[in-house]
Image: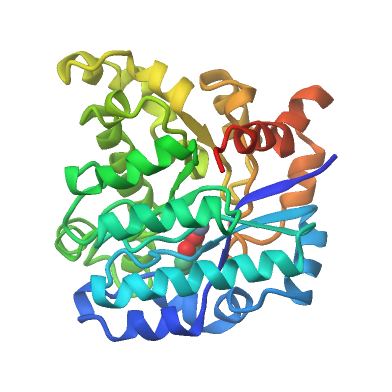
Amino acid sequence: MRVFGLEEHFVTTNVIDAWSTLAPEWQDLAQKASSSGESGRRLSEIGEERFKAMEEAGVDVQVLSLTAPGLQNLSPAVAVPLQVETNDLLASAIRSHPDRLQGLATLATAAPDAAALELERSVTKLGLNGVMLFGRTRERNIDHPDFWPVFEAASALRAPIYLHPQSPLPVVRAAYYDGLGQGVDAAFATHRIGWHYETGIQLLRLIASGVLDRFPDLQLIVGHWGELVLFYLERLEPLADMAKLKRSLSEYIRSNVFVTPSGMFSHNYLRWAVETVGVDRILFSTDYPFERGGSRSFLEKIELSETDREKITFGNWERLCSDIRR
Ligand code: GRE
Ligand code: ZN
């Protein structure tokens, strides 16, 4: 059994420095965990410590991506050179360890035309296997027409887009997540639900806005078992008619979306994903280094046939990558 992890992060000093120059309202809540403590240290290392952790987790290949929120809230002047530098660095790490590492590009979405060109370079010249996007770019939601050049490029390349959380806007945090006390507020706005509403909404916006009708070949990968959307698929279905979409909501989910655990190693969630999207649409991920432990035993205890388990751990990813046009 070969195991690919699809949401496995890294960070660089230059990215952390760029984040720290932002006005406070654009400094993401995840920034602290990305730049300090054990997670900060692990993110900045691409070497033996990471490979040892992969072994413990039962992961053979990490598909690396920059940690949240990537370069999306940086100004074009800062983000455009940084996307090139970061993707070059990622490609160089992969060249040093081609049997252990693959990668997803990072993009300066505030400069959509430059981002689209960089996606093309990342896939065709650097050998990266798609891109990770973090929902909004400041106040602009992911479906904003400004970002269509990126979707056009991803669609032409058949390059998958991993849709990752970022923290809700400051105004949303103040309205919905603050006031429960120090320690609770930041968690509530991020991995203890805020991220998942935020990202589920970005996914639904991509569908309801018609972006998937315009670019029907796009393949999205969504972490945390589909960012709540799978659990409410039946409830949400009427949106498709209201938005005058070409297909039903469940058809978009079943033909344009893959889901991964992001370190949420729950067999209940896995069973639900198998029931709603099917084994052909499930990939594996650990969200290194944020969720550690439980990966290996989760994989060992998957109650599916060996064939189905192999689809999840590598077959579906290899199929997706084989469609990429270099
Ligand atoms: C995550 O991906 O889960 C994450 C980040 C950055 C900080 C904390 C965190 O990307 O959990
Ligand atoms: Zn993550």
Residue 125 appears in which quarter of the rendering? bottom right
Q: Is residue 100 left or right of residue 192?
A: right
Residue 306 appears in which quarter of the rendering? top right
The foreground one among 6 and 39 is 6
The foreground one among 126 and 240 is 126
Q: Residue at x 76, y 30 (%)?
A: 309
Q: Is residue 107 left or right of residue 40?
A: left
Q: Is residue 191 visible?
A: no
Residue 166 appears in which quarter of the rendering? bottom left
Q: Is residue 320 left or right of residue 218?
A: right
Q: Residue at x 59, y 20 (%)?
A: 278
Give the colour scheme of this rendering: rainbow
Q: Residue at x 51, y 48 (%)?
A: 130
Name the spot of residue 127 as percent of width and height, x first.
61, 54
Name the spot of residue 254 as percent of width and height, x first.
47, 21
Q: How many marks?
A: 0
Asked if residue 280 is positioned above or below residue 313 in the image, the reply reads above
Name the spot of residue 156 as percent of width and height, x first.
42, 36
The foreground one among 156 and 314 is 156
Asked if residue 247 is positioned above or below residue 83 in the image, the reply reads above
Q: Residue at x 55, y 27 (%)?
A: 273
Asked if residue 136 is positioned above or below residue 17 in the image, the reply reads above
Name the spot of residue 250 as percent of width and height, x first.
40, 18
Q: Is residue 27 visible?
A: yes
Quadrant of the frame with the N terminus = top right
Quadrant of the frame with the C terminus = top right
Asked if residue 243 is positioned above or below residue 143 in the image, the reply reads above
